[in-house]
Image (spheres, grey):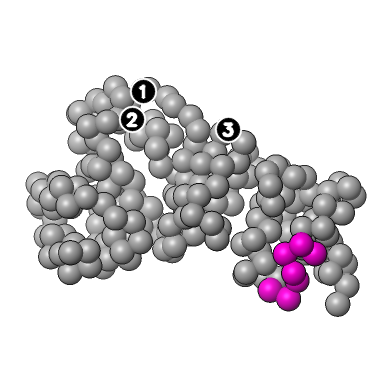
């Protein structure tokens, strides 16, 4: 197989996206040795087809650019969710801003990865449906609430209502807490918020079954 030709054609038919060498090797290009794949991508960079943005991570430059290709790749289409202050700002929990952008994602093989000083990626191997994204966001607010700088408690309550009122399902919780250990106190808080919203739930029993 001509690896260079195969990768070149893949990049030319793939719209503006991230190519993470270690992840792509495990998902699409298992037949290509890591060093060979990296060498080919470096060759494609010389041709202007891709651009290196971090060690082993390339941006495929094909089609119309997207606003933030890192977020689009690692947090789009069921691959992850943006957390941290970027998420708190989105839901108006606080006006305080703090970088870098933090992303939980299933689209990488290592546990953590930094891309420059703007992004921190953390591996979270679940499929991020809308329900999972919104429940993880709520759990992050509940878990980190006391430490969120400049927290607006009324907006925090509104954010939790927005995230949970129409989207909570008990079935979504087990894979989340099996892959990311939240505190028991966070589960108590989640159960309490859901009860206040009139949502029946089995949060505490699920947590005890999966994590204790």
In the rendered image, is residue 16 in sight? no
Q: Nearer the viewer, mark 2 or mark 3?
A: 3
Residue that extends furthest to the front in the rendered view of this protein: 35
Residue positioned 39% across, 37% down in the render: 84
For residue 179, above or below residue 95? below
Crowd class of label 1 (few under 14; some 14 to 19; many from 20; radius 10 Å): some
- Which image quarter holds the N terminus? bottom right
For residue 38, above or below residue 25? above
Picture coordinates of residue 202 (x, y %)? 13, 63
Q: Find numbered disc 1 in the image and state the secondary structure of the residue it sits on.
A: loop
Q: Are marks 2 and 1 in contact (CB under 8 Å)?
A: yes
For residue 115, above or below residue 10? above
Q: Which mark is residue 92?
A: 2
Residue 1 located left or right of residue 37: right
Residue 58 located left or right of residue 120: right
Query: Mark 1 = which residue?
Result: 95
Query: Mark 3 = which residue?
Result: 117
The answer for how far apart the CA atoms under marks 2 and 3 are is: 24 Å
Residue positioned 21% across, 50% down in the render: 183
Name which quarter of the figure residue 146 lies in. top left
The answer for how far apart the CA atoms under marks 1 and 3 are is: 21 Å
Magenta region: 30-36
Crowd class of label 3 (few under 14; some 14 to 19; many from 20; radius 10 Å): few
Q: Earlier in the sequence, mark 1 or mark 3?
A: 1
Q: Are marks 2 and 3 in contact (CB under 8 Å)?
A: no
Picture coordinates of residue 167 (x, y %)? 28, 55
Q: Which mark is residue 69?
A: none
In the rendered image, is residue 205 in sight? yes
Closer to the camera in the image, 179 or 74? 179
Picture coordinates of residue 182 (x, y %)? 26, 52
Residue 10 located left or right of residue 149: right
- Which image quarter holds the C terminus? bottom left
């Amino acid at each position: 197989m001509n690896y260079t030709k195969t990768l070149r054609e893949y990049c030319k038919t793939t719209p503006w996206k991230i190519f993470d060498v270690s992840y792509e090797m495990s998902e699409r290009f298992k037949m290509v040795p890591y060093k060979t794949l990296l060498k080919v991508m470096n060759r494609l960079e010389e041709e202007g087809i891709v651009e290196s943005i971090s060690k082993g991570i390339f941006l495929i430059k094909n089609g119309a650019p997207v606003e933030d290709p890192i977020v689009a790749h690692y947090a789009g289409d069921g691959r992850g969710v943006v957390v941290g202050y970027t998420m708190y700002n989105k839901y108006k929990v606080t006006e305080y801003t703090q970088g870098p952008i933090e992303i939980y994602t299933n689209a990488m093989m290592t546990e953590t990865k930094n891309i420059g000083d703007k992004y921190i990626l953390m591996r979270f191997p679940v499929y991020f449906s809308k329900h999972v994204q919104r429940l993880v966001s709520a759990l992050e607010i509940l878990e980190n609430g006391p430490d969120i700088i400049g927290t607006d408690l009324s907006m925090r309550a509104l954010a939790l209502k927005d995230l949970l009122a129409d989207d909570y399902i008990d079935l979504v919780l087990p894979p989340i807490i099996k892959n990311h250990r939240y505190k028991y106190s966070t589960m108590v808080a989640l159960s309490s918020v859901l009860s206040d919203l009139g949502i029946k739930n089995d949060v505490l029993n699920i947590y005890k079954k999966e994590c204790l």
